[in-house]
Amino acid sequence: MEDHSGARIEQWFHSYSQDIYRFLVYYTGRTDIDDLVQETFIRALKAIHDTEVENPKTWLFAIARNVAIDERRKTKLISWLPDIFLQHLVSHDKTPEESLMLSENKRLLYEMINQLKSSYRDVLILRGIKGLSSKETAEVLGWTENKVNLTLHRAIKAIQNKRHVSIAEVMNDAIM
């Protein structure tokens, strides 16, 4: 029997690598994450034989999240610094992915997101910024949909309390 796992991973790389890249930029606060994207797909290739993949995108997001967590542990980075996050988001290369123009509201929102506890940050990035459904977010995080929705609600409330704004403003600032 012929093994087509390499071809599947290559197809998924072409389909999802930009989504994984953007997710890792949001998740880590860095733009120098090409190695993490590569590690995500290497781990996927190694694990594809042992896993039945129903939704490759959510499976890859889960792997990318674990890669980012492992990287953070490896470098013993305790908290992500918003100033570093912002310095990396403004690119000098002027590529579409790296030349993110942030308004003052968006900059403040990202600072607040980076200061939230990790479960709130995870849900806000996956649901609010990446636009995954509750079901997809639950798959990535290994949670129930109810836990995703409750955590999202609490995360939005935490930001609202810091900014004194409406839910619509929080979500609009995150994706605009």
Image (spheres, helix red, strand yellow):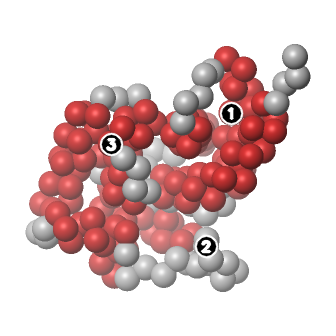
Q: Are marks 1 and 2 in contact (CB under 8 Å)?
A: no
**Residue 98 at x, y = what percent?**
61, 73
**Among all residues in the image, which is located at the extreme front?**
1
Q: Give the total of numbered labels.
A: 3
Relative to 9, is 168 on the left or the right?
Answer: left
* Label 1: few (<14), some (14–19) or many (≥20) C-alpha neighbours in 10 Å: many
Query: How much space separates mark 2 and mark 3, taking CA atoms?
Result: 28 Å
Which label sits on residue 134? 3
Q: Residue at x 66, y 41 (%)?
A: 40
Q: Residue at x 78, y 44 (%)?
A: 10
Query: How much space separates mark 3 and mark 1, taking CA atoms?
Result: 23 Å
Amino acid under label 1? Ala
Pointer 1 residue: 44
Which label sits on residue 98? 2
Query: How much space separates mark 1 and mark 2, taking CA atoms?
Result: 25 Å
**Residue 165 at x, y = what percent?**
13, 70
Mark in front: 2 vs 3: 3
Disc nearer the start of the sequence (2/3): 2
**In what quadrant of the picture does the C terminus appear?**
bottom left
Amino acid under label 3? Ser
